[in-house]
Amino acid sequence: MSPFSVLMVCMGNICRSPMAERLLVLAAESHVGERATDLLLVHGAGTGGWHVGASMDPGAARQVRVRGGNAERFAARQLTTDLLEYSDLILTATGEQSRFVHGMRPDTTERTFVMGELRRLLPEVDLDELPPFAPDPDAVYARGVALVEAAAKARRGRPPRPADDLDDPWGRADKYFARIADEIEATVQPLAKVLLT
């Protein structure tokens, strides 16, 4: 079975989604070390193709590095239906991007969340009802799929809130990137803990 796949989506795939991608990997490594890449497939894409092939924005890369993550070997991609099809959890920077994802593939609705939306919903999930964690891909996959289903149920069909959105830091000062990275960590750190402990 393939590893549990988490797709991060923003507008151009050079600021928010790369930070989310690399900071989730970092959070996963804090629990399972080098096994993180065997247990989770974390990747990203942008709704637009303006930056395809580009490196991570320097401001985003600085935030990843200062927090202990790896900002190297990154190339921006544009979102495709194939990426959506093979992703078990899709996290977007904004509600608008979630709607874009739904428009591309309506069958993604139950596994697509705005970053801040998932952060709100995670405490509502009864972790005792999830399959137990074990450090192998099949166990993490089963736990991840059950987590997504539980979070979708906790959503009760309600739309995301405007406050769930991550502001776009592109072209802004480092302190702006730092605030967005803090908000990302507030989602990906508890997510990694639930999946990998």
Image (cartoon, rainbow, N blue to C red):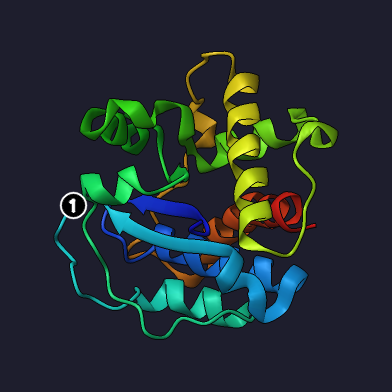
Residue at the far left in the pictured view: 50
Q: Residue at x 14, y 61 (%)?
A: 50
Q: Residue at x 43, y 45 (%)?
A: 93
Question: Along the horizontal axis of the image, is 167 left or right of 36?
Answer: left
Residue in front for this viewpoint, 115 or 177? 115
Residue in front for this viewpoint, 124 or 10? 124
Rendering quarter of residue 179: bottom right
Question: Along the horizontal axis of the image, is 154 left or right of 133?
Answer: left
Residue 187 image position (x, y, % from top left): 63, 49
Q: Residues within 10 Å of mark 1 (few under 14, many from 20)?
A: some
Residue 147 image position (x, y, % from top left): 65, 37
- Asked if 35 appears above or below 19 in the picture, the reply is below
Rendering quarter of residue 55: bottom left
Residue 194 image position (x, y, % from top left): 74, 49
Residue at the far top in the pictured view: 157
Numbered disc 1: secondary structure: loop
Question: Along the horizontal axis of the image, is 134 left or right of 63?
Answer: right
Amino acid beneath label 1: Gly
Residue at the far right in the pictured view: 128
- Asked if 194 appears above or below 51 in the picture, the reply is above
Residue at the far front in the pictured view: 1
Q: Residue at x 49, y 80 (%)?
A: 62
- Asked if 130 appears above or below 58 in the picture, the reply is above
Q: Which residue is mark 1?
A: 48
Count the labels in the image.
Answer: 1
Residue 132 image position (x, y, % from top left): 80, 46
Residue in front for this viewpoint, 137 or 152? 137
Q: Quadrant of the C terminus?
A: bottom right
Q: Residue at x 42, y 53 (%)?
A: 8
